[in-house]
Structures are given as C-alpha cells and as structure tokens.
C-alpha cells in the first residue's frame, strides 16, 4: 500500500464499524477499510479518531465576487438588488490580477476546509469578459487539487443586458462549462420565460449542462422553475439541468407546489438551495411575520428530487 490512514472515524452512514478504522490506499484507490489493518505503507497518517469523509462539494458559488466586501461601498440595505447594483458599480474598476488573487485566496480557504470541488458562476455581462478569463486562469492553476467548474452567468439578464447572449456564447467558446441564467431578473415575466427557452435550446444544441438562478424572490408568482422543468422535458435535457435558489417556493401555495414538484422530478431537474445567504437576503420587505427564504427542501427530497446546498457568497456585495 502507498498510504494508510490509521484510527479514522467514518460517517455512521458509511461504515459498519463503530470503532475507528484504518484505511488502506494503493494507486489512488481505497482498497481496505478495517480496524487494525495488518499492513504497512511508506506514508501513514494517524487520524487520532478524527472524522474522515469524502471531499466536500460546493455546487453554487460566485468566485469572481468573493472577498470584494466593501468595494466600492457596503451594501446598506442588505438586499439582493443592492448587491447586484454594487457589483455593477464595481465591474468597471475590476482588474484581472485582482480577480485572480482574490479567487486563489478563497480556493486556499476552501481546500483547507475539505472542499475539493466547486461550481462557480461567473458574470458574462461585461463585454471584456475579464472575470471569465481570470477564473479560467484560476481553474488552470488549481486543477491539481481542486475541481473548479464554471457557469456562464448573465448577471444582469440575458435579454435585459445588451450583448449578454453573445458574451455567454463567447465564454462557452473560451472553455466555460455550464449555461447559466437569471430569469427572475429580466424586465418582465414573459422575458424571463423567453430567457429560459433560448438558453435551454442553446445548451441542448451544444450538449451542455444548465444551472439557472431561478426565482430568488419572495414573490410566489415568480414561477420560472416551472418553465425550466418544462423546457428540460421538451428538449430532452433530463439530468443535466439545475435550478438554484428557488426561494419563491417558500411563499407558494401548497396546491401549486403539489403540481410543480412532480414536474421537476419527471424532468430530472435538480435543486440547489443556498441557506446561509437566502435566510439573510429574503424577507427584507416583510414587517412581521418575516419569511426566512428557504426553499422546500424536505418536500423536494420526499418527491425524489436531487437537492444540494451551496455556499453562494463569501464576503462579497
């Protein structure tokens, strides 16, 4: 064996052993998990009873904005809309080197805490594609120890922002992995639905995955996840599409949700909730009672929908 980790505690769901175990590794693969493994290796690590798990995955992050808190000013209202406006104010001041440095610092923090895979959305509404080029360079540099997947994200709306769809296509051509969108930020509900259609059709043509910011709102009538699931089904994208946030679902009536969840399951659309951020951002217009901004995680899991948690933001607008 090349490596043995001694006295490791495993997650209860992953082990039949109640006591610590030794983990034997050869040629990059785990080949033995048992107490008091009768073998030796040139490298042995004593976990001393600490938890040993598979690496963590963050399926929703914004690495182009990370560690930019206070630039160019602090978000006074604490709302998503002011955060987006602040990012728009900062974009003209961005430099590629600063983007790379902040992202690399965050990658170090993430890996130190067990994160070895991150899906990061990267804004494509700047025609210079500074952030895209910066994060592609970061992806190259961190590849030996971190799987960084990038989503082409039209932060200001693919229809609302002039040239955003062309920019998105350019980003994909440069090597960005996934097609993103933000239908609830388009100017009308109809435009939001149209943005879902054109982005899903483009992804289907290119053989790409889709991950859309969807219904990050307290408005129960923001129902773009329904359109996303319908387009996924129409275009045969089952298993390749994700709806992120879905916070409007916390305000929808139960009858509508009883129709929506089976549609999502049938279309194979996954859901990514971002609890740390959305319980802070949502409900800002409420007096009392205040809504907490969490989508219907238990109900989606019970319906057979794949659900994950993302971090979304670290020290950004």
Image (spheres, rainbow, N blue to C red):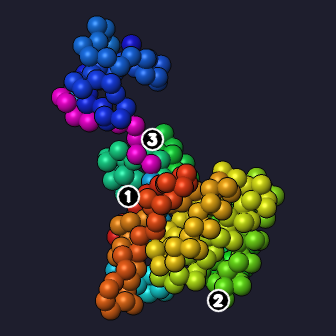
Would you place residue 219 above or below residue 167 in this image?
A: below
> SS at mark 2?
loop
Q: Position of residue 295 (x, y in %)?
A: 46, 68
The boundaries of the magenta stretch are 48-57
Q: Is residue 83 left or right of residue 306?
A: left
Q: Position of residue 13 (x, y in %)?
A: 36, 35
Pick the quarter of the image with the N terminus.
Answer: top left
- Residue 172 lies in the magenta-colored region: no
Residue that numbered label 3 is attached to: 145
Tell me, yes or no, if residue 300 can be seen here.
yes
Q: Position of residue 101 (x, y in %)?
A: 42, 61
Towards the viewer: 313 or 14 = 14
Residue that numbered label 1 is attached to: 106
Q: Is residue 227 left or right of residue 245?
A: right
Dot 3: few (<14), some (14–19), or many (≥20) neighbours within 10 Å? few
Q: Quadrant of residue 255?
A: bottom right
Q: Which mark is residue 187?
A: 2
């Amino acid at each position: 064996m090349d490596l043995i980790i001694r006295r490791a505690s495993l997650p209860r769901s992953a082990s039949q052993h109640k006591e610590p175990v030794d983990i034997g590794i050869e040629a990059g693969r785990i080949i033995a998990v048992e107490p008091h493994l009768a073998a030796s290796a040139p490298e042995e690590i004593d976990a001393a009873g600490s938890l040993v798990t598979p690496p963590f995955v963050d399926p929703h992050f914004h690495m182009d904005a990370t560690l930019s808190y206070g630039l160019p000013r602090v978000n006074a209202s604490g709302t998503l809309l002011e955060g987006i406006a602040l990012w728009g104010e900062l974009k003209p001041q961005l430099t590629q080197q600063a983007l790379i440095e902040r992202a690399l610092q965050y990658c170090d923090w993430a890996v130190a805490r067990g994160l070895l895979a991150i899906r990061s959305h990267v804004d494509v509404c700047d025609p210079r594609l500074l952030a895209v080029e910066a994060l592609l360079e970061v992806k190259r540099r961190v590849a030996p120890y971190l799987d960084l997947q990038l989503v082409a994200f039209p932060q200001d709306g693919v229809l609302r922002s002039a040239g955003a769809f062309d920019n998105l296509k350019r980003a994909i051509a440069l090597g960005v992995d996934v097609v993103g969108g933000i239908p609830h930020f388009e100017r009308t509900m109809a435009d939001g639905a149209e943005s879902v259609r054109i982005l899903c059709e483009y992804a289907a043509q290119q053989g790409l995955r889709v991950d859309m910011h969807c219904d990050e709102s307290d408005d129960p009538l923001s129902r773009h996840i329904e359109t996303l699931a319908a387009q996924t089904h129409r275009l045969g994208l089952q298993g390749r599409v994700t709806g992120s946030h879905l916070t409007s679902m916390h305000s929808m009536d139960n009858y509508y949700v009883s129709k929506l969840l089976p549609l999502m399951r049938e279309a194979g659309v996954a859901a990514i909730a971002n609890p740390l951020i959305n319980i802070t951002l949502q409900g800002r217009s409420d007096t009392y009672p205040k809504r907490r901004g969490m989508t219907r995680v238990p109900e989606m899991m019970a319906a057979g929908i794949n659900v994950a948690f993302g971090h979304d933001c670290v020290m950004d607008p």
